[in-house]
Image: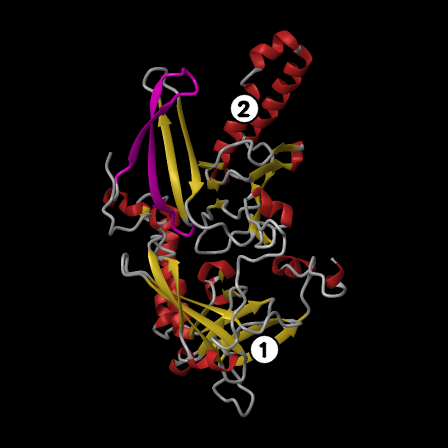
Amino acid sequence: MDSCAVKEPIFTDINAVEACETTEIESLCVNCGDNGITRLLLTKIPFYKEVVIMSFSCEKCGFQNNEIQSGGRIEEKGVHIVLNVKSQRDLNRQVVKSDYTSVQIPEFEFEIPAQSQKGEVTTVEGIIDRSIQGLEQDQVVRRVQNPDLANQIDAFVGKLKKLKELETSFTLILDDISGDTFVVNPRAPYQDPALQVRHFVRSKEQDHILGIYSASEITEDGEGGLLEPVDPEKYPLENLESEVLQFSTNCPSCGAPCETNMKLTNIPYFKEVVIMATNCDICGNRSNEVKSGGGIDPKGLHIEVKVAGVEDFTRDVLKSETCSLMIPELCLEVGPAALGGRFTTVEGILTAMRGQLTQGGVMFGDGADPETKKNLDNFLNKFDRVLKGEIEITLILDDPAGNSYVQSLTPSKPDDKLSLTHYERTFEHNEELGLNDMKVEGYEET
């Protein structure tokens, strides 16, 4: 059994899997009862996360099975994905589906409950095929015991098979409380009009399904006790801005133990923020994250800044973890989770956006279809012209929490290239921020 050296990253990039060979384990075949081989591969999927891919095969009966499990931390929010399937290209979309994903096709009132199928890397057509196989599995017995039910299932299977012929379009809905489901955008890096992705805050019951409990819930007396209160004499609040705190964590890239530095700082004309920086000595990964120190503002914030010269590239930018980015001239939109929270410059945020696109791996590398690869190459060439200052753009930051910021080059008077608009949040915005279920009055009684 081969394994990587201790000093190597735990999860290897999917484009460099030769650096870490698969692990083989002898395991029982559920089909014939003999022993087969399970192969495990720990890898990272570009634009997604760390995963454990498992493949089982039995030489005696020929039975094969594969599934995928998340190898990283549980996402903070669940994900709700709606895909309008209209073409063969939509049927061929790659889908990463977790164990907690429910699948719905509302046109046929068809639903696959969560945890009834294992997580897998598949396609939209593969989901339909697996559903058909599941329905046909016991049809021989049903035709003897309950012919009417068997005929109804045959008729429904026929409808599912016609979906692959695309006589009419249909809607595929994936709902995953773990937030680990992902559908590829074949038009990347451009927006996908057929794909809608919404993140939501889990309920307490959904947290319990995932094995997530609060400190008070896992203590015997229900009074908490796992987290000690901060000693104000040891960590006085007035000294936090002058100190850099350090705590142990795991590298977000390879999972190895490392240290994270955290500092509270005050941005002029804005508010206090917490900056966290992580440096991994094992894989060399460096990351920084910014979180607001002032909670959620009463209104959302929409910022537009014209980038038309060298001085605009030097503007300070604070992008919170709830802020999405848009560049209309490039038809580009980046969701809040793609870059996380960052404190950088306009040039830094643009460079980070381009860096995300060049890490496409198999989705945009030699394994990608020619049209997608051509679209990306043309897009990157245009993006490079933006970074050189040859093309003027408008950088838009939209933050429902109101915790983002762009530096004004003329603090004492209005900046002609910078506009800020505060707006009332929608119900969907409040749902994503977890505000709809928040009780702010009379909470002492519960």
Q: Is residue 431 above or below residue 243?
A: above
- Disc 1: which residue: 420
Q: Which quadrant would residue 112 be assigned to in this image? A: top right
- Disc 1 is placed on an element classified as strand
Furthest toward the front, the residue is 221
Task: Determine whether, in the image, residue 123 is placed left or right of residue 143.
Answer: left
| Residue at (53% x, 54% y) in the render | 76
Q: Is residue 196 visible?
A: no
Q: Is residue 112 visible?
A: yes
| Residue 426: in magenta span | no
Badge 2 crowding class, 10 Å Cα cut-off, few under 14, some 14 to 19, many 20 or more, is few
Q: Which quadrant would residue 256 be assigned to in this image? A: bottom left
Q: Which residues are magenta?
A: 21-48
- Disc 2 is placed on an element classified as helix
Furthest toward the bottom, the residue is 412
| Residue at (27% x, 57% y) in the render | 282
Horizontal and vertical percent for residue 156? Answer: 63, 23
Q: Quadrant of the C terminus?
A: bottom right
Task: Determine whether, in the image, residue 151 is placed left or right of residue 375.
Answer: right
Name the foreground residue: 15 vs 368: 15
User: Depth-wise, is mark 2 or mark 1 nearer the camera?
Assistant: 2
Q: Is residue 379 above or below residue 82?
A: below
Q: Is residue 37 above or below residue 4?
A: above
Q: Amino acid at mark 2?
A: Gly
Horizontal and vertical percent for residue 22? Answer: 29, 37
Q: Which label sits on residue 169?
A: none
Q: Which label sits on residue 134?
A: 2
Task: Determine whether, in the image, residue 209 is placed left or right of residue 42.
Answer: right
| Residue at (61% x, 18% y) in the render | 154
Name the foreground residue: 125 vs 323: 323
Q: Amino acid at mark 1?
A: Leu
